[in-house]
Image (cartoon, helix red, strand yellow):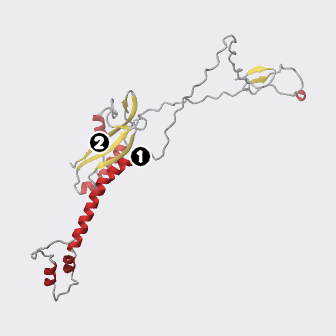
Amino acid sequence: MKWHVDWNDAVNPDRVELVFANRNKEYGAYVIRRKYEKRVVNALLIALSGIALAVAIPILVNYLSKVNFGKKDKMVEEVTLAEPPPIDKSTPPPPPVIPPPPVQQTIKFTPPKVVKDEEVQEPPPTQEEVKDVQISTETHEGEKIVDLPPENPVVSDDEGKIFTIVEEMPSFPGGEEKMLEYVAKNIKYPSVARENAITGRVYVNFYIDKDGKVQSAKVVRGIGGGCDEEALRVVKSMPTWKPGKQNGRAVNVNYNLPINFTLK
């Protein structure tokens, strides 16, 4: 397939030969211009083929979905069940089977007789042996009754959970004022922080467990100079708190405590 190409067109064969006369025709521009028409035709054919496939595929799929490839229609067969035999009401039902009672443990008890020691064949049972058994003329082991655990033990949803806010928050013995007094009384300003004039506020995070004990204390924001370690030491040494409660039960409650370090 060829068509007329204007002389001013860069891919005109005559113009291409004239431009590259006495030049290296192995250069890429010469090859590109000479094969331009062929590549345009190939691109056009590929584009037309792609359009044809895009149109034909949905039609072909729709046709194949309606074709029955020799599949047999499903056969539906109705099955009629026979009626059950009539119930004979004249014969009474058998009585329920009642299991025998468990055999109770007994211990043989022989009336005491006065005989010589060497003639004693079987010593009488002690008081401990007859404490929880019945007295009989023979000894039986009996059946052991084992108490089974409940099938569905009750597990609280709050078990192990750490709350942030509860109905009744935990409290230091004597209240918040006593807690501040305790911290101020027990805190010891580190010598390194004092020499370097380090001041500020240390934030300690911990939680009060169900028994009122301080657990998992850690510094979340410190100022260094030994102040962080000192604040942590004072918090861990606190006495037992009154635990927090949720729905009337003691639970674990999270707590944040800021401790100030100020030089006087």
As drawn, is 210 to the left or to the right of 83? left
Q: Quadrant of the N terminus?
A: bottom left
Residue sitting at 22 percent across and 55 percent down? 197
Q: Position of residue 187 (x, y in %)?
A: 30, 46
Q: What is the three-letter code of the residue carrying label 1?
A: Val
Label 2 SS: strand
Crowd tier of the residue under label 1, counting other residues whose Cα lies within 10 Å: few below 14, some 14–19, many 20 or above: few
Q: Nearer the viewer, residue 27 or 132?
A: 27
Residue sitting at 22 percent across and 75 percent down? 35
- Quadrant in the picture for residue 144: top right
As drawn, is 101 to the left or to the right of 178? right
Residue 195 visible in the picture:
yes
Q: Position of residue 249 (x, y in %)?
A: 40, 29
Q: Position of residue 260 (x, y in %)?
A: 25, 45
- Quadrant in the picture for residue 170: top left
Contact flag, marks 2 and 1 (Cβ < 8 Å): no
Q: Nearer the viewer, residue 134 or 126?
A: 134
Q: Which residue is mark 2?
A: 257
Q: Which residue is mark 1?
A: 67
Kindly report the distance in space between the C-alpha atoms of the residues bearing marks 2 and 1: 78 Å
Q: Nearer the viewer, residue 257 or 31?
A: 31
Q: What is the three-letter code of the residue carrying label 2?
A: Leu
Q: Position of residue 169 (x, y in %)?
A: 33, 32
Relative to 23, is 46 above or below? above
- The disc label shown at residue 158, or none: none
Toward the bottom, the furthest residue is: 22
